[in-house]
Image (tube, rainbow, N blue to C red):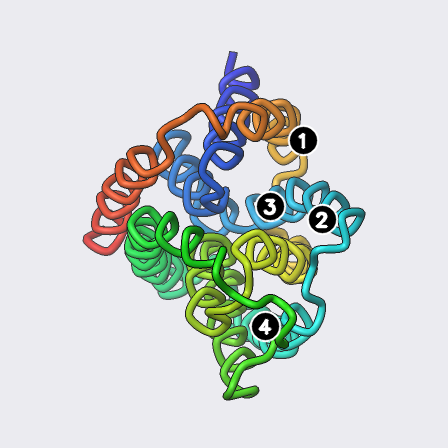
Amino acid sequence: MENFAFVLAGFVVGLIVGLTGVGGGSLMTPLLIFGFGIKPALAVGTDLLFASGTKFGGLLNFARQRVIPWRVVFSLSAGSVPAALLTLWALHELGTSNPMVQKAITFTLGIALLLTAAATLYKAIRGPRRIEAEADLELERPADQTKHPLLPVLFGAVIGMLVTLTSVGAGAIGVTVLMLLYPHLPLYRIVAADIAYAVPLTLVAGLGHASLGTVDWQLLGLLLCGSVPGIWLGSHYVSRVPERFIRSALSVLLAWAGSKLILI
């Protein structure tokens, strides 16, 4: 019965991700902690490989369509992957069973969820306006360039640290950062860039957690069994759902979960 509950959890999270684009980490990690009593470090490590597996399919799809702005992906990865490796080194030195490390993970997870809630609400309000404005842009100009080339690397490093500690940040926070850094980049290419850089980041961070013993492989398999059909179904019906309402409701849910984690 518990195995079915994990498959169902993967399906529900996959469905919501397919409908809204909100990263699975911001939903799955608190669900594993609060709903199933999984230890924070184990929940984070398992969810990282869960995210990497589910987003890899999206990467292949966007790559076939040739819409991924690789310059943006490389800039973010130049900061996020080294930051993930440094964070993993720190976790290895301190030990994931250390109570201080567990507290740091839950507190940082709470902060990341609050940031994700704010980013999700921003996308719900700003996203439709941005899409309307894009029709007037001249896409021939280099939209994948930014005035400050070091900013993507810096933001990538911050997201890399957050993702490695909490499994949260590569989704809603990443998209919001990209919207701010690359205001002339079409929204569908921003989503493609976010998924593309998240795959190697979550894979590196997830394998690092596996080396620390904080990945439950059986749990990972059950979650993926549910998430794959869930994501397919959500992406199939995404155009029929009031996106602004769902994103706004999700932002409230994430803010509640983040506040609860901070107060633990």
Cα distance in 3D space between marks 2 and 1: 25 Å
Q: Give me the disc on residue 221.
A: 1
The residue positioned farthest toward the right in the image shown: 64
**Mark 2 element type:** helix
Amino acid type assigned to the residue bearing label 2 in the image? Phe
| Residue identified by numbered label 2 | 62
Cα distance in 3D space between marks 3 and 1: 12 Å
Cα distance in 3D space between marks 4 and 1: 39 Å
Nearest to the observer: residue 144 or residue 216 = 144
Is 198 above or below relative to 231? below
The x, y position of residue 179, in whole percent, is 45, 64
Cα distance in 3D space between marks 4 and 3: 28 Å
Which is more N-terminal, label 1 or label 3?
Answer: 3
**Which of labels 2 and 1 is toward the front?**
2
Q: Are marks 4 and 1 in contact (CB under 8 Å)?
A: no
Q: Quadrant of residue 243?
A: top left
Q: Quadrant of residue 208?
A: bottom right
- The reply, left or right, for residue 187 in relation to residue 78 is left
**Mark 3 element type:** helix
Which is more N-terminal, label 1 or label 4?
Answer: 4
Amino acid type assigned to the residue bearing label 4 in the image? Ala
Answer few, some or many: residues within 10 Å of disc 1's Cα (few below 14, many 20 plus, some between 14 and 19): some
Q: Residue at x 41, y 30 (%)?
A: 36
Q: Are marks 2 and 1 in contact (CB under 8 Å)?
A: no
| Residue identified by numbered label 3 | 51
**Mark 1 element type:** helix
**Mark 4 element type:** loop
